[in-house]
Amino acid sequence: MSDTAALHPFDAATSFTAGSDGSLAGTTSPAYWNMVGPFGGITAAQLLKAAMDHPARIGEPVAQTVNFCAPIAEGAFAVRVKEVRSGRSVQHLYAELVQGETIAANATMVFARRTETWRHHASVMPVAPPPDAVPVLGRKPPLAWLDAYEFRYISGLPIMGSEAHATPQAAQSLLWVADQPPRPLDHVALASLCDIFIVRVFQVRGLRIPAATVSMTSYFHADAAELAEQGSRPVLARADSIRFGDQFHDQQAELWSAAGRLLATTTQVVWFRE
């Protein structure tokens, strides 16, 4: 059995081999395949993991912006990471995922050495029943990446058919979600979880139409110790959108720990065509 075969599927998907030119060699994972390419969350996780593996990296992730530039084909890719600027406590890194001559995705990331400061948690966790009181979603579209997560929808389960809803439906969803099989939470997994929401236009229109995330920014509010405290328990995830039109729509989301702490906030812009 190979080393990657013994790993959790997520860890196998975010594993790299170092090249002599400083780049990292990786390969797409069938466990995280979407309709015509990899699930965007796994691409975000791969770029963040590559940055975390960089020898010049300091501290922990604070922010990541991923731009999905071109379709990622099944098979091998390379990730190149560049140190943009580093101060005493804050660092900026750039990473790009390359196939052949094409930059298929790139990311800017902020890392920091976090120190204890004044704290104030102004936001309030959405009211939700405990995960065990919410049934696991059984029927899913035949997309591999959906089986890599356990979904427990409290509200906003997307319902899609052959015709659009007569009137637009609410864009908000609230659900518990966890890696499947279970895996302790860390920043790389959190980067992927920031993209686990079904495209909002599918839910609002009730149709599965051509759509893809173009750019996604995630802010990581929790440090490594807080994520370790979460362990493999489900996180509470809430997503919403406020404007659709002219081929694009927004999406905002929050991810909360089982203890009621805000772990991450994320926003993205999605291209769609109908």
Image (tube, helix red, strand yellow):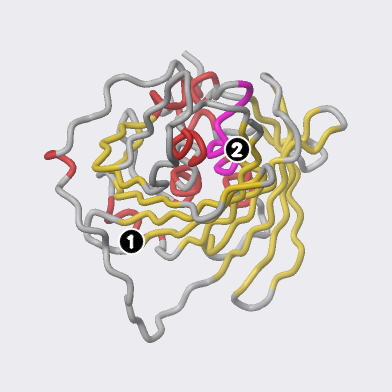
Residue 39: percent from left, percent from top: 55, 31
The residue drawn where x is 62% and y is 73% is: 90
The residue drawn where x is 47% and y is 22% is: 163
- Above/below status of 35 relative to 155: above
Task: Pick out the residue farthest to the bottom.
Answer: 118
Which SS class for mark 2? helix
Q: Which residue is mark 2?
A: 43
Magenta range: 36-45
The residue drawn where x is 48% and y is 41% is: 200
The kind of residue on which mark 2 rests is Thr
The residue drawn where x is 54% and y is 19% is: 30
Depth check, front residue: 47 or 138: 138
Q: Which residue is mark 1?
A: 226
Label 2 vs label 1: CA separation?
Answer: 24 Å
Task: Pick out the residue farthest to the top.
Answer: 1
- Above/below status of 51 relative to 133: below
Q: Main secondary structure of the magenta part?
A: helix
The kind of residue on which mark 1 rests is Glu
Considering the image in quadrants, where does the C terminus appear?
A: top right
166 left or right of 67? left
Depth check, front residue: 104 or 249: 249
Depth check, front residue: 237 or 29: 237
Depth check, front residue: 201 or 91: 201
Residue 268: percent from left, percent from top: 58, 51
Q: Quadrant of residue 203?
A: top left
23 left or right of 229? right
Residue 233: percent from left, percent from top: 25, 44
Disc 1 crowd rating (10 Å Cα; few below 14, some 14-19, many 20+) is some
